[in-house]
Every structure is written in structure tokens, then in C-alpha cells.
Image: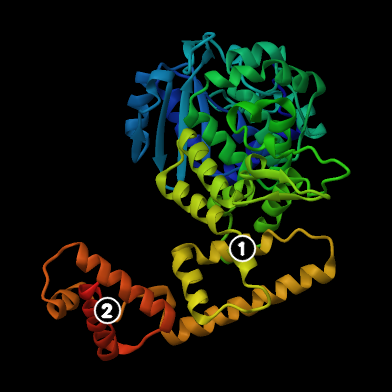
Amino acid sequence: MTSALGAAGELAIRSLIERAPLASSLAQAFKAKGFTLALVGGPVRDAILGRLGNDLDFTTNALPQETKKILQVWAENIWETGIAFGTVAGKRGDTTVEVTTYRSEHYSLDSRNPNVEYGTDILGDLSRRDFTVNSMALELTNEKPEFIDPFNGLQDLAKKILRTPGRPGDSFTDDPLRMMRAARFASQLDFEIDAEVMASIKDLSHRISIISAERVRDEFTKILMSPNPRTGITILVDTGLADIVIPEIPKLRLEVDEHHHHKDVYEHSITVLEQAIMQEKRLGGPNLIIRLAALLHDIGKPKTRSFIEGGGVSFHHHEVVGARLAKKRLQELRFDSHTIEAVELLTTLHLRFHGYGDGEWSDSAVRRYVRDAGELLTHLHVLTRADCTTRNKTKAARLSGVYDSLEERIDILMEQEELSKIRPDLDGAQVMALLKIKPSREVGAAMDFLMELRLDRGQIGEEQATKELLNWWENRATK
């Protein structure tokens, strides 16, 4: 245990006082009841890096029920959803805290949830954490704050390397999700993974299958939403983890031979992801839906690849197959229905622009483009632009210019016709009154006819729409 504060400890304490002044009052609340409290893990690491946020993790020798009693007094709100695993959470002001009893946890060979045992001291607690850079603590209930770094996490932090406190194999056997965390921290912090750690992940990658889909989803999301998702995704693929958690991604590494040329679909997909991230300002900032769609938009290619005689490759209807695969994978990872439906739609539509040519679409086709994209129109703009990864600058400039013209046409039609609120010129009640019918399939068919009329000809007004509807109804009746 390192008792001397040193420069790193001083920096961490200063950062904690400046950014999380409530931590001291929480420590005093635990000390008053005779318990210890230490800031631990990621927040200590981030405090040293000068990036401490308002979500703080603590560890204590108090048992969960004692922690709950203290937080009920100290916090404005508390959550005990993790109390079975030793964790009680609370919020006071802008600060959210999670307080966990000293513990060790491990997975049996076929369990999806950890077995938790409470420990007796902070050293044992730190020894069972995932990486040395997360195995540092600030003890806050002594006379003076004490910086604790038993596994040289500070040194590894300076070297920007991920190592485990003990043997990597033991750590990953205890909690296989730590293998995905390694990929996540590499992406988030721009760290390298120690060679021994990387080798162990490759050896034990199959163990990730025992982890619940929800926990895998959360780690994958953090990788995808990191500043550099390429790093984490590549680690998942190279170690074999992706073969289990999202196998559609490694399958994009299609074999390319000298006779049938096509882009490296894996590299193309990562580049599309990076180019989409560069445009996220249009979506208000980092956006999970666009990142998922960019990464997954071509996952239908492996199943649809066919070789063309004389050279070349086709991927006929890969957008349709890809949409189905994306939906299935995201469902298995327990993503919410809104995200799944959005990614499925964007994957389905990502090739639509290629029918635009040099601007040959009619206004009717432009209206349908807007109607089909719905609230995801800006997402589709971003995905379509990001999907251009050609190194031919002339071709890239031409495609960008053509898409500029499509967006300009959409803007004009939006202003003229309120395309974002496309509706038929008559509503259902008017249709039933004009046709003298009750709610039925016929009403739906009539509304479909009016919508197609609206898309083809724009706004034609109630009078003209009435004439067209009655004419359609009469012709339908005589057939």
C-alpha cells in the first residue's frame, strides 16, 4: 500500500475537492458511523487525468444495509437495485454516488451473474478489480486523505497501458466482461493493451458467452460511443470476442482475390463509421443510432456476394438482407425497440440515393424519399454522405455535389409543402362522409390512394382531391 500522497495523490485530491465537494461530506457521514470510505476505480483514474465527472464510485467496509441507512440521510434520492451485489446508489445535487461494500466476485463456469462475497479490507477489494489503472483508491476517512496504489496503477496510467492486478487469466475467468472492458478503455483512453493481457483475451474469448446480453450491449455501446471506436472494434475482432458477441462484423472481412475486385467491406464500414462521427453535429452530438447504422449498414454483403463472370462482385439486395440481420442482432443484444427500428430503416434505405443519378428524380420521388425516412431524414443524410469512401477525389466531389442538390430540393419542397408533415388533402372523416362508408378496409384503401396522389402531385387542395377520390371510387366499383 502506498501511504504517501505524492504528486498524483495531491492532484487527485485537488480535483476531487474542486469537482466533487460533496465527497468530503459523504466521507464524514460514514466516519461518524465508524466506517471507512474510499473513492475508488475509474473516478480516481479520471481525477488524476483531470477529467473527473459527477458520477463517483466508493468502497466501504460498511455492509449494504448500513450503507443504505447512511445514504437515506445524506442523499436526496437513493437506489438499491444493486444491493444484492453490495452496491447502493444515491444522488445529492448534481453528484451521483455508488457505494459498494469491499467485495470479491467471480463467475462459475456457466453462470451469467457474478457470485459476490464481501471482503474485509480495501487491499483485497483492489486486488480483484479489472485493471491496475482502476485499482487505485483515495481513502477519505483517515486524518488525511491517503492515496492507495498497490499495483502500480499510476505507473501504468503514465505509460497508457492496460494490465491486470494479478494474472490476466484469473481476472478474466472471474469476470469475462473485463475482456470487453479492455477494448472499451483502449477506445476511450487511447491506451494499449499489455501483450500478456491480449494473449489471455484471445485464449478466453469464448468465456464471454456466459455474460448476459444486456451487459455485453452496454460495453459494446460504450466502445461505439467512445472517441475512437475503431480501436475497440478492432480489438473485439482480432481477439475473437466479436465472433461471439457480434459475429456480423468479423464476417465483413471478405476474402479479396485478384480476379474479383471489391472494397474491403470491413475497412469500408469502419471508415463510414468514422465519417459519420465527423458529421454528428448535424444530429446534435454523439448519436448511437447513426453509429450503429454506419457500422452495420453493409452486414448483408457476406450473404449476398456473388461473382460476376469476367471479374467483379455483386451484392444484390444486400441492404434488405442487412436490415434483417441488423434487426436480429440488435434484438439479441437487447437494444430498445426505437433504436432497432431506426437502424433497420436506415440500413434498408442507405442505397436509395444511388438511384438519384445526377438529379433525375421527379418531385414525387423526392417526396417519397422524405416520407420513407420520416424523422430519420437527417440521419439518412449523414449515413449517405458517410458511405462515400472512394479515394477518387473527383468522384467524391461529384457525389457530394449531387447530394447537395438533393438536399436543396428537399429544403425547397419542405418550404413549399411542409414535407415533414406529409398528409393527404382529405382526412378519414371526410373520406367516409364523401363515400358514405363506415370505418373499414375501404377507408384505408382510400387513404392510401390519397397519400399516393399527394406524393405524386404535391398539394392539390380539398376540391381537386375530392374529385380524384370520387373518380377513383367509381372506377373501383365498376371493376
Hey, which quadrant is residue 275 in on the image? Answer: bottom right
Total tally of numbered discs in the picture = 2
Q: 128 or 17: which is nearer to us?
A: 128
Q: Position of residue 461 (x, y in %)?
A: 31, 89
Tell which of 439 and 392 is nearer to you: 439
Q: Earlier in the sequence, mark 1 or mark 2?
A: 1
**Residue 175, above or below 231:** above
* Residue 377, placed above or below residue 37: below
Q: Is residue 360 left or right of residue 85?
A: right
Q: Furthest-right residue in view?
A: 258
Secondary structure of residue under mark 2: helix
Pointer 1 local density, CA inside 10 Å: few below 14, some 14–19, many at least 20: many
Q: Is residue 186 visible?
A: yes
Residue drawn at x 28%, y 84% as measured from the top left: 468
Circle 2 residue: 472
Residue under numbered circle 1: 382
Height in image: 266 above or below 281?
above
Is residue 369 or residue 53 the one in the foreground? Answer: 369
Crowding at dot 2, Cα within 10 Å, few <14 / some 14-19 / many 20+, comes out as some
Identify which residue is drawn at 35% across, 88% down: 460
Q: Amino acid at mark 2?
A: Trp
Query: Residue at image x 70%, y 44%?
Result: 306
x, y percent for residue 84: 38, 19
Q: Amino acid at mark 1?
A: Val
Mark 1 residue element: helix
Q: How far is mark 1 from mark 2, CA to CA?
A: 39 Å
x and y percentages locating residue 479 in the rendered image: 25, 72
